Amino acid sequence: MSGALVQQLAGYLSETETRSGEAIATQLGCSRAAVWKHVEALRQLGIEVDAVAGQGYRLKEPLELLDKPLVLAAIDPAIAPKIGRLDIESSIDSTNSALRRSPLDEQHASIMLAEHQSGGRGRRDRQWHSPYGRNLYMSLGWKFDQSLSELGCLPLVVALAAAKALASAGLKGHSVKWPNDLMLDGRKLCGCLVEIQGDVHGPCHAVMGVGINIHMPATVATAEIDQPWTDVHSRLPQVSRNKLAGMLLAGLFHDIELFSQSGFEPFRQDWNLWDGLKGRQIDVYADSGPLHGVARGIDNRGALLLDTGKEQLKLYSGDVSLNRRNI
C-alpha cells in the first residue's frame, strides 16, 4: 500500500462515523476486495481500526493528520516567505535522512515532516519510536557561513526552540537535559538530532531534527523503549499537532537566524532558565568511562561543566542521567 493511500485512508476514517467497505473502495479508487488489505496496512502502522459487523470500519481514537495549510497558518506571516519548501510524507526512514538526501543547495530553509518513521534515530544512532500520526517528526535544513567549531552550541539552540514552543502551547514543568533532550517529570518528552557537514572553516550545512512525543499510546513497541518516556497529551489532551508544528518552525527560524548572526550569547539566559541539570548530582557515561559529579552549567562552546569534587571537567559528549540522590 503506497504512502499516499495510507494518508488518504487514515484521513478518511473517523472515530465517530463508520465507513462502509463500499465507501472506502470509492474513496481510494480500489476494489472492495482490497479494502481489507488496506485496513490491515493501517493496523500494521499501529493505527487501531475497529470493524463493525455489517457497517464497516472506524478509528478507535481520533487521529489528527498533518496538513500543510494548517501548519503554515500557525507560522508568523513574516517567516513563511523564508521557507524553501515544506514536505509532508506519509512514511519514510527518517526526516533527517530524507532531507540529507536532497542536494545541498536545496536543503537551506527546507522542512521535512512525516506521519511515520521506519528508522527514526536519536543521538548515537539510537532508535526513535515513531508511531503513525501520533507524534511530531520534523527536520529543518540550514546553511551556515560559520566554521564547524562555531556550531558547537547549535544542538542547544534547537532544544531551547522546542522547549519554548511547547511552553507557548501551554505546557509547564518541562526542562532541557544537556545537550538536547527535553524532560517532563523525569521522563523523556523530546529528542533533537543535529547533523552537520561542511568545511572546517565553513560554510557548513546542518540538518536539525526534532521528535516530540505528542500522543503516544503504550504498546508492545513502547515497552521496549530503554528509558522512561512521556508525551504532551498527558498534560495537554487537546494539543494540536499542526499548530505545534507551526509554532516549533516559527521558533526554529527565529532562533537559528539569531544564532547565525550573534552566536550563543543571546541564548545564555534562556539556557539558564531551561537547564534541567544545573546544580544537580548527575552520572555521565562518556567514552572514557562513567563520571559522577554536580552539573555546573555549560561553557561558551556548549560543553557540560561537571564538578567531580576534585576538578571541573568540560564534557563535549556523553549520556547523562540524574544521580539517584536526586530522586
Image (tube, helix red, strand yellow):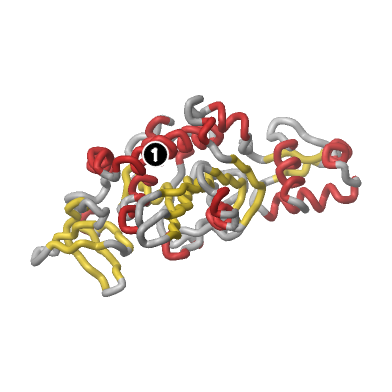
Residue positioned 47% across, 63% down in the render: 126
Q: How many marks?
A: 1
- Above or below for 141 versus 77: below
Horizontal relation, residue 311 to residue 23: left or right = left
Answer with left or right where residue 84 lies relative to residue 25: left
- SS class, disc 1: helix
Coordinates of residue 225 in the picture (x, y in percent): 47, 60
Instruction: State which quadrant residue 317 falls in.
Output: bottom left
Q: Is residue 87 visible?
A: yes
In this rendering, the answer to whether 165 lies above or below 300 is: above
Q: Amino acid at mark 1?
A: Glu
Q: Nearer the viewer, residue 42 or 100?
A: 100
Please tell me which residue is depicted at 50% across the width and 61% down the height of the picture: 127
Q: Quadrant of residue 61?
A: top right
Horizontal and vertical percent for residue 155?
A: 37, 51
Left or right for 206, reference 39 = left
The residue positioned 13% from the left and 62% from the top of the image is 312
Residue at figure coordinates x 46%, y 37% from the top left: 248
